[in-house]
Image (cartoon, grey):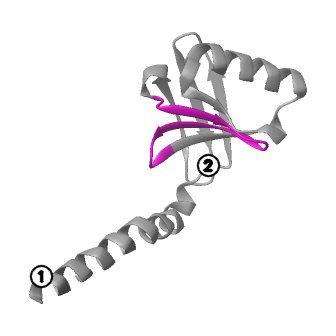
Amino acid sequence: MVLGMLAVVVLILFLHLYFNMPRVNYKKSKPLLADEITYRFYEDHVEADAIGENVNGADSYQYTVFKKIYEVNSAFYLMMTNGMTFILPKKHLNAGQMDGLRKFLASRFGDKYINCF
């Protein structure tokens, strides 16, 4: 009986952490989101420059840190971990840039690149 109740409490705690905490963390971090991020792709890394009201900085990421690359109708998602993903909205790209990025990502990442549309 005690083990059963303990299992229920652990399950509820797990579900809360899994489903609600990302939303809470997102709301808390919203002031830290950049207004504009510029990405530059090179042969061995990508550079990201962030500019915003509370954020201003640049960083460089080797391609080995990316676990999966997803392309959907509206964006490219470059996933490093479950909690960190670069989102490149297609609305900011012209047709040539979109095609070039698609070909680059597909050739660079192979089976890690997944086209979902």
Q: Quadrant of the C terminus?
A: top right
Question: Which is more toward the observer, 104 or 94?
Answer: 104
Q: Residue at x 60, y 39 (%)?
A: 50
In the image, is residue 106 above or below residue 51?
Answer: above
Q: Is 34 on the left or on the right of 45, as rendered?
A: right
Question: Which is more toward the observer, 7 or 53?
Answer: 7
Q: Secondary structure at mark 1?
A: helix
Q: Is 94 on the left or on the right of 3, as rendered?
A: right
- Judged by depth in the image, the label closer to the viewer, 2 or 1, is 1
Q: What amino acid is at disc 1?
A: Leu
Our reading of the magenta stretch's main secondary structure is strand
CB under 8 Å between discs 2 and 1: no
Residue found at the far top of this picture: 43
Q: Position of residue 86 (x, y in %)?
A: 58, 39
**CA distance for labels 2 and 1:** 46 Å
In the image, is residue 75 above or below residue 19?
Answer: above
Q: Position of residue 75 (x, y in %)?
A: 73, 41
Q: Dividing the picture into quarters, in which one does residue 11 lie?
A: bottom left
Question: Which is more toward the observer, 79 or 93?
Answer: 79
Point out the stretch of residues depicted in magenta.
66-84
Q: Is 96 on the left or on the right of 59, as rendered?
A: right
Mark number for residue 34? 2
Q: Secondary structure at mark 2?
A: loop
Q: Quadrant of the N terminus?
A: bottom left
Q: Dividing the picture into quarters, in which one does residue 111 lie?
A: top right
In the image, is residue 16 above or below residue 96?
Answer: below
Q: Position of residue 70 (x, y in %)?
A: 63, 36
Q: What amino acid is at disc 2?
A: Ala
Q: Which residue is mark 1?
A: 3
Question: Which is more toward the observer, 46 or 2?
Answer: 2
